[in-house]
Amino acid sequence: MSVLAVDGLRAYYRTSALGVSRDVRAVDGISFTVEAGEIYGLAGESSSGKTTLIKTIAAATQPPLEVVAGTITFNFPTGPIEMQRADRRSLAPIRWRHLSYIMQGSMSVLNPVRRIRHAFVDFAFRHIGQPKSQFFDTVRAHLARLRLEPDVLDAYPHQLSGGMRQRVTIALATVCRPEFIIADEPTTALDVVVQKDVLAMIREIQRELGSSILFVTHDMAVHANLADRLGIMYGGRLVEEGRTADLFRSPRHPYTAHLIASLPRVGDTAPKAGLSGAPPNLADPPAGCRFHPRCPRASEICRREVPPLEPLATGHRVACFHPEPA
Amino acid sequence: MSALLELDHVSRSYGGGLFARRQVLAVNDVSLRLEEGRPEIFTVVGESGSGKTTLARMILNMVPTSAGTIRFQGADLATIRGAAARRAFMRKVQPIFQNPFEAFNPMKRVDRYLFATARRMADVATDAAAAEASDTALKSVGLSLAEVRGRFPHQLSGGQLQRVAIARALISKPALLVADEPVSMIDASLRASIVNLLRELRDRNGLTIIYITHDLATAYYVSDRIIIMRQGRVVESGDARAVLDNPQHPYSQLLKSSVLSPEVPPGVSHA
């Protein structure tokens, strides 16, 4: 059974002022599953709806954002939970114990005026359910696993380097051995040398715990090195999904194909073309396929109808009327 | 050949005042020379804290050097005094910043930046002439005044807005552009077009561009020459392709080996 099943999810930012109501359709009909023990990569540029999607999955929706349709189901050992209608009481035992997060800005996760140890107490103490002394032994053992000295518990966030801070947030997110981790651009703010270490560490701890990770980043090179499967978002919809290797080897959606072809590589000076046009305005998206105004393969049907996300080969789905040849 | 820009053992330190505990050398003994009449893309690569932005700010004459001299077209930047002289220098050396959404005031229409620059920097007296100068600059970045007139920053995409920022820099017909991470905030589908634009400006407009980045892949794609900085020092310099194909300094080698390849590594089992 899938750990996470998202089905027909629509989440809109709904505003109304002076009798004019407006919907920004940031997530517009998304279905996918994440299996136990896999890293599912979610790629997309700014305003593609990826942050809105993870907000709704984490049940962190606040007005004006609301879930308009669809379901988000987590299957945890404690039983299934539907996030779109979960209330505070049912979420409290789930959060951090079964579902945790690694955020982009480690500085805004850690309280700058409190020592690191307090963060562990706040986040994990009640879930782990051990007396204090034993609890800190557990935390120290876990920190050692992430190659952090136990001294970091007594440090303030500003005393640690960016890479160490991000490892502390990874330790925080994994200390309760959750089944599911949402990682939102966890390495984007880091230097390349540090980024490589942090990614290796995420991979290592994920293998050890057997957790599933929903890994969100716009950086395709990170996905190539980490994700088992990859979903590509464009204009609030999933346009392609497949095993990472398949997607990189033979992308079928023109948008994915462009993303992969335009990646600069060290050692490659062949001219790269930019994509013309601009990302769609989700308050007033183009009819039919949202990519059609920028698509080199667009035809009449693309302007009229929304292409469904359909399987092409085993485990490879694409939403396009004219997919690239395999 | 005469030098367009010449840095002679330039250093910059911060702190170290009466009560400061320690002094930080942000840039430490950097020398470089860009030739007049030989347009090129000169890339400065380094991690955060390597001093690359401080170097850019010194070249833009926004901060003075602590030691050493910077000469632009033969004139020492430290000797520039007075509004007129400053303006003459700014005409010749223009910046492009990282995040176009922060560079533009969200409450102000973007064309006003273009017109103000035209009036102040390009000796344009009338509205019509300002519009014409703006249109010419916008056309050289693949836009036109008709597309941006009356628009606010949020009505343009990141790529378009960065093009407007580059067009604004071009109005005064500069000889040198200093671009500090101009593509790192731009979406992947638009990034290639901005990087290509830098190449075009070099080849078509004969501009020399100092391109500051942490991204070795785009550096390889556009650069003619490169310097790799670490903790304020230049650890390696030379022809960009030669340096990146075969880095000599251990730090350059580490940097290159840390770049994630967009190829799916064959060893990884994607079960």
Image: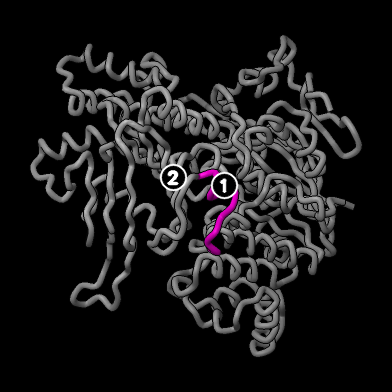
Q: Is residue B250 magenta?
A: yes
How crowded pointer 1 is (Cα within 10 Å; few <14, some 14-19, many 20+) is rated as few
Q: Residue at x 57, y 65 (%)?
A: A166
Determine if residue A124 is in view. yes
**Residue placed most toward the observer, B73 or A178:** B73
Label ID, residue A44: none
x, y percent for residue B47: 48, 57
Distance (Cα) linking label 1 and label 2 = 44 Å
The image quadrant that residue B72 belongs to is top left
Whether residues under marks 1 and 2 lie with C-beta atoms below 8 angstroms apart, the answer is no
**Residue placed most toward the observer, B71 or B136:** B71
x, y percent for residue A19: 48, 25
How crowded pointer 2 is (Cα within 10 Å; few <14, some 14-19, many 20+) is rated as many
To which residue does mark 2 refer? B43
Answer above or below: position of B208 versus B144: below
Q: Which residues are magenta?
A: B240-251
Count of numbered labels shown in the rendering: 2
x, y percent for residue A27: 66, 36
Determine if residue A89 is in view. no
To which residue does mark 1 refer? A62
As shown in the figure, which amino acid type bears the numbered disc 2?
Thr
Answer above or below: position of A162 versus B202: below
Answer above or below: position of B232 versus B55: below
As shown in the figure, which amino acid type bears the numbered disc 1?
Gln
The image quadrant that residue B97 belongs to is top left
**Residue placed most toward the observer, A238 or A269:** A269
Q: Chain of mark 2?
A: B
